[in-house]
Image (spheres, rainbow, N blue to C red):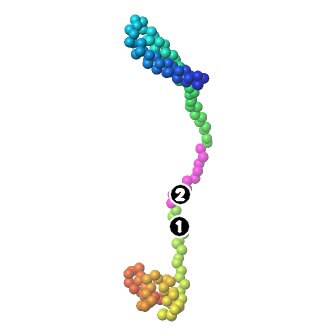
Amino acid sequence: MTKFAKFTLLSAAVATVVVSASSPALAGHRHHRNDAAIIAGVVGLAAGVAAGSALASQPRYVEPDPVYVERPPVYVEPQPAYVDEYPAPPRRTYVTYDLEPWSPQWYRYCSDRYRSFNPRSGTYVGYDGREHFCTAG
């Protein structure tokens, strides 16, 4: 049915264009009768009927009514927002060696442990910015 309405509307539009194009040609003959106006009125009426039927035959979407379902309330125990008891941070343990200063093991230990270790003086720069002698033991 929708295709029929579309073709009817299209044919009415084409007929309107043809009649409106022929009206200026007939205006030069000075007819006493107003046949072109009557034809244009009939074509306009047909085009209006076709357009109205095409619009009326379009399917419409109807929103379904909402369905409300009552559910019993469910109590959920709230989780605490903060925790007071945190585990103690792990303690750093260092393996201490009783290494003799200036020995190859002592050099290896101090250079591995301190990035700022100076093997010429046997010192490293601490977090306080001062030099400290490396003791391994």
Q: Is residue 69 left or right of residue 40?
A: right
Q: Which residue is mark 1?
A: 86
Check the image and report above or below for 12 versus 78: above
Check residue 16 for magenta coloring. no
The residue labelled by disc 2 is: 80
User: Residue 66 versus residue 24: which sits nearer the camera?
Assistant: 24
Quadrant of the rendered structure where residue 24 is? Answer: top left
Residue 125 can be seen, yes or no: yes
Image x and y of residue 30, in percent:
38, 8
Out of 46 and 24, give the one closest to the viewer: 24
Q: Earlier in the sequence, mark 1 or mark 2?
A: 2
What predominant SS class does the magenta segment belong to?
loop
Alpha-carbon neighbours of circle 1 within 10 Å: few (<14), some, or many (≥20)?
few
Residue visible at 43% across and 85% down?
Answer: 124
Percent position (x, y) of residue 11?
Answer: 53, 21
What's the residue at 39%, 85% (across, down)?
131
Residue stretch in magenta = 73-82
* 75 in the magenta segment: yes
- Residue 52 is at least partly visible in this image: no
Q: Residue furthest top?
A: 32
Find the distance from the CA under tag 1 to the CA under tag 2: 14 Å
Q: Is residue 133 left or right of residue 66?
A: left
Q: Residue at x 42, y 6 (%)?
A: 33
| Image spot of residue 137 (x, y percent) | 51, 89
